[in-house]
Image: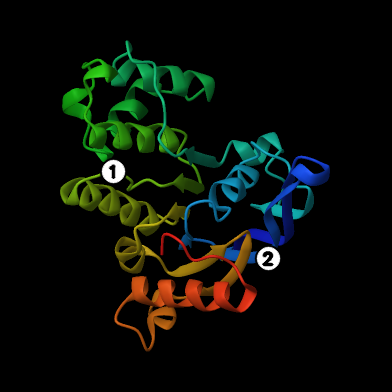
């Protein structure tokens, strides 16, 4: 059963000569209870896609089905969790106060109990009364993850959840993601940290210049290469050479 179905999805910004096609007719599916990694170079269309998946941006064309409905449907939004890239917080609130604010928006019953449970899950209970301005990068990422799961979502969208974390911080977040998967959650991750993708993702979609190049398991994508990163770089180079795109930065 597929929790996410994307069909012929495109996104265009601007008009006339300034028109930019950032997502180009992409199609893919994500199975219920799986971890799906969406990988690509900077500017490939990852964040534009995830914004459409959570209803923050409207497609120019194509369709998105999440849990059998549209991301714009209120009943669908209630079962989604979203962690944006580099999340921003109210710096003068404590972690507990911020989650209380988010829980109130979701009208969560027994919110004090739920907040405590989520803080324990992301290993932030010890810092619940500390002001967010004093949080480290790793703590901010875990707080971002906490607000994304406060409503106990069935589908979780994470945009660069491992970005900027040291090895210990990455290990903690990966452990949380795998625990959520074990509970039957469907998780869609945008990232460029390919070693971590190979560890936690069941399937991977590769996007470049707004186009899907492959959707496969990490092991199959890596076949014939040293690892997923070398397979990814080789694929991008090959496609860009064939289409006449530049390969700067790879």
Which is more toward the observer, 129 or 107? 129
Image quadrant in which the N terminus is located: bottom right
Q: Secondary structure at mark 2?
A: strand
Q: Is residue 68 left or right of residue 130?
A: right
Which is more toward the observer, 142 or 105? 142
Q: Is residue 83 left or right of residue 26?
A: left
Q: Position of residue 246 (x, y in %)?
A: 54, 65
Nearer the observer: mark 1 or 2; the answer is 1
What residue did someone put label 1 on? 164
What residue did someone put label 2 on? 27
Q: Secondary structure at mark 1?
A: loop
Q: How many marks?
A: 2
Regarding residue 161, the answer to whether it shows in the image is: yes
Which is more toward the observer, 104 or 222? 222
**Residue at figure coordinates x 16%, y 48% from the top left:** 168
Which is more toward the observer, 191 or 115? 191
Q: Position of residue 136 (x, y in %)?
A: 21, 30
Image quadrant in which the C terminus is located: bottom left
Q: Is residue 131 left or right of residue 163?
A: left
- Give residue 125's mark: none
Q: Residue furthest bottom?
A: 224
Q: Quadrant of residue 243?
A: bottom right
Q: Quadrant of residue 93?
A: top left
Label located before the other in sequence (1 or 2): 2
Give how far apart the Cα atoms at labels 1 and 2 are: 30 Å
Q: Quadrant of residue 228?
A: bottom left
């Amino acid at each position: 059963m597929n929790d996410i179905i994307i069909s012929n999805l495109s996104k265009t910004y601007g008009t006339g000569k300034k028109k930019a096609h950032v997502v180009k007719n992409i199609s893919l599916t994500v199975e219920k209870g799986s971890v799906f990694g969406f990988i690509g170079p900077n500017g490939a269309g990852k964040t534009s896609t995830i914004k459409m998946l959570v209803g923050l941006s409207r497609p120019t064309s194509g369709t998105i089905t999440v849990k059998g409905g549209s991301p714009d449907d209120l009943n669908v939004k209630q079962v989604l969790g979203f962690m944006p890239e580099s999340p921003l917080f109210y710096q003068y609130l404590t972690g507990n106060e911020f989650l209380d604010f988010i829980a109130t928006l979701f009208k969560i019953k027994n919110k004090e109990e739920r907040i405590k449970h989520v803080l324990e899950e992301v290993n932030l209970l010890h810092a619940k009364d500390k002001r967010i301005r004093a949080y480290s990068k790793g703590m901010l990422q875990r707080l971002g993850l906490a607000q994304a799961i406060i409503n106990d979502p069935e589908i979780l969208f994470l945009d660069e959840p491992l970005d900027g974390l040291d090895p210990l911080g990455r290990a903690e977040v990966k452990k949380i993601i795998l625990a959520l998967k074990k509970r039957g959650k469907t998780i869609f991750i945008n990232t460029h940290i390919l070693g971590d993708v190979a560890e936690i993702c069941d399937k991977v979609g590769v996007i470049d210049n707004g186009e899907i190049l492959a959707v496969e398991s990490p092991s199959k994508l890596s076949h014939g290469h040293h690892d997923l990163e070398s397979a990814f770089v080789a694929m991008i180079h090959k496609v860009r050479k064939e289409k006449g795109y530049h390969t700067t930065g790879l």
